[in-house]
Image (cartoon, grey):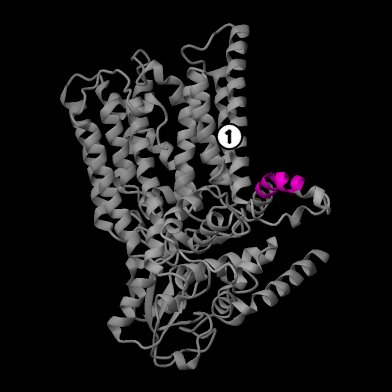
Amino acid sequence: MVSTGSRISSQVPAGDLPRVPYARVLAVLLLALMGILAGGAALRESATFDEVAHIGAGVSYLQRLDMRLNEEHPPLAKVMAAIPLVLRGTRADYTHISWTNSAQFIPHAFMGEWIFGEWMLARWNDPQRTLMWARFPMLILTLALGWVVFSCARRLGGDWGGLLSVSAYVSAPAFIAFGPLVLTDIAITLFCLLTLCQFAEMWRQPSHQNAFRFGICLAGALLTKFSSGLLFLAFGAFALSLRFLPLPGVPRDKAQRRAWSRLRWRWTFKATLLAAIVVYMVYFVLSLHQSTDALYLIGHSDGWTVVRRILMPPWLYLRGLLLFALMSVRPTFILGHGYSHGVWFYFPVLLVLKSPLGFLGLMALLLGLALERRRHPERPPIIPPSEAVFWRVIWVALVVFTAACSLSGMTISIRHFTIPIVLLILMLAPLPRMIQGLTTGSRLWPQGVAGAAVLLAACSVVSVVRAYPFYFPYFNSLTWSHPMYWWASDSNVDWNQALPEVREFADRRGLKTLNIDFYGNTDPTLTVPQARFWSCQEPSADDANQWVVISSNVILDAEHCAWLMQYPHEMIAAGSMWAVHLPSVIPAAGAPGGPPPASQRKPFLGMPLDTRVPTINLFRHPDQLPSYCADVEAQIKKYYRR
């Protein structure tokens, strides 16, 4: 699955850098360390916000060939996570109201996916084993991505470039934190990188074999996340760049260059058609038993049944794409301020704050050496001519994906920036050749720079080892001036994964009940039996002199609970959550030291209704799901009639 052809898996470009003995073994050892860190951390964590819906949906796709749940994301990552669960005989009750009531799309299936996933994960099966086996394939994907990074970097920078890039990858907290989770972010990063590799190979040497590999990788990307459509912008930008920045091997004559490009675009079209066929077939099989009632407008008679079945795959894909687009604008919180929309500086700021200082040092060193090389244009190129197309594809894609992320309305988490991060890591691959190419009067200067690069890479690895097992709230020491909940929120800090640590706190204190204002939509009592849902904005007199636990996300962003931090408090899970001991008398709302007045209370996540309360109630009383969905549907209709 991770092979991108013999050029990636085995061929290393010739260069003047010395080979590293057992380079592949060293890369495997680094990835093994990452597996231990990421896997060990994941074993300690509760199910995160989105995992509940993804796991339940993936199992239902394979067991029922019905895609009614979680249509807002393509199925591949969810199916891969569900494979070991289905093979182990994971139980799901398809007579349950959460399934039978989800035949309609919105709001029934949208609400039902959470109830069904919660019951399947925590009530019909052993929650710890189910979560562990669902996360196992995702951990394998994460390590596979690391191997592809190493292989691609070796093409660009030899053994030293490969090891430098893979060191940066395994020490990236974002990949360690999100890699083992049942999400789409790391999977789409893997398939996008494979697609870019094969696109470059096909344009370098068009052939049936290269086009087939490109088409399969592109299909994997399209089946993983709807944002994979940005790949087509990257392809177009690459072709456009050839008109202004010619590459070796590209004809200079206008007519010859046009013929050269047309040949490659024809192969690209054929490969894209193959990808579309694969996507269609996957959707067709996984929706084979799904009702086609949504297409009844086409025809009601039995004769139209086959037509509706044939049209279901594109209908499901386009409907999911539409829902994805509607959900792609979310409020943003960064640097102590909330915004109603995305902000362009969100991801650059997070990249600086949530990266090890060693990685930032490597990027600064790369920038400095790149500027130094501009003063000496007579030097030979650092990228082998045989890899010029691949290098151009990588940095053009980096520009396209970075621009798209910066302009996106979905600036809520570093996990949505993993594709630019991995492409940025590949930018480090030529660094060893740049160091070796330094022309100074002293040999000690290149050796000193090389030693600094090795030291920076080692520091990055050491920093993530020291951070174990808390990678969600990882921030580097540049954030010393403010608490982490001031810098960012959402899954950058807490994503409901720290509930086991909350239980340890409650058990250690001997607490029989514990008020929790958490950041999730699952029933916390499944992990913390003492838990009782609580709003930090509306404490009661009975809460006085009690311990309460709050998510970092509700302090400044999701709610308005900074008033609590003036009382004795302690960190849980390295700051993902906080335990606060309330005073013997809680000041009145709006009074100094008290909760905010009603006029200053923030609705959770900016929504008119705190969805946690009804969702938890539906988990415990799923028979109320039809009436709840009917009420939501009526509110939606009323809203659009205005």
Mark 1 crowd level (few <14, some 14–19, many ≥20, 10 Å Cα): many
Q: Is residue 337 left or right of residue 293?
A: left
Q: Which residues are magenta?
A: 306-317
- The image shows residue 565, relative to residue 367, as above or below, that is below
Residue ID at (57%, 82%): 597
- The image shows residue 187, relative to residue 441, as above or below, that is below
Q: Is residue 138 visible?
A: yes
**Type of amino acid under label 1:** Ala
User: Residue 366's image quarter?
Assistant: top left
User: Residue 149's image quarter?
Assistant: top left
Front-most of residues 135 and 459: 135
- The image shows residue 323, relative to residue 190, as above or below, that is below
> Which element carries disc 1, helix, strand or loop?
helix
Instruction: Assess whether residue 255 is covered by the magenta stretch.
Output: no
Q: Quadrant of the N terminus?
A: top left
Q: Position of residue 156 (x, y in %)?
A: 36, 26
Q: Quadrant of the C terminus?
A: bottom right
- The image shows residue 407, relative to residue 469, as above or below, that is above
Front-most of residues 182 and 463: 182
Q: Position of residue 416 (x, y in %)?
A: 50, 49
Q: Which residue is mark 1?
A: 275
User: Residue 404's image quarter?
Assistant: top right
Instruction: Give the prevailing secondary structure in the magenta stretch.
Output: helix
Q: Position of residue 413 (x, y in %)?
A: 48, 55
Residue ID at (34%, 54%): 478
Residue ID at (36%, 67%): 575
Q: Is residue 480 visible?
A: no
Instruction: Assess whether residue 314 is covered by the magenta stretch.
Output: yes
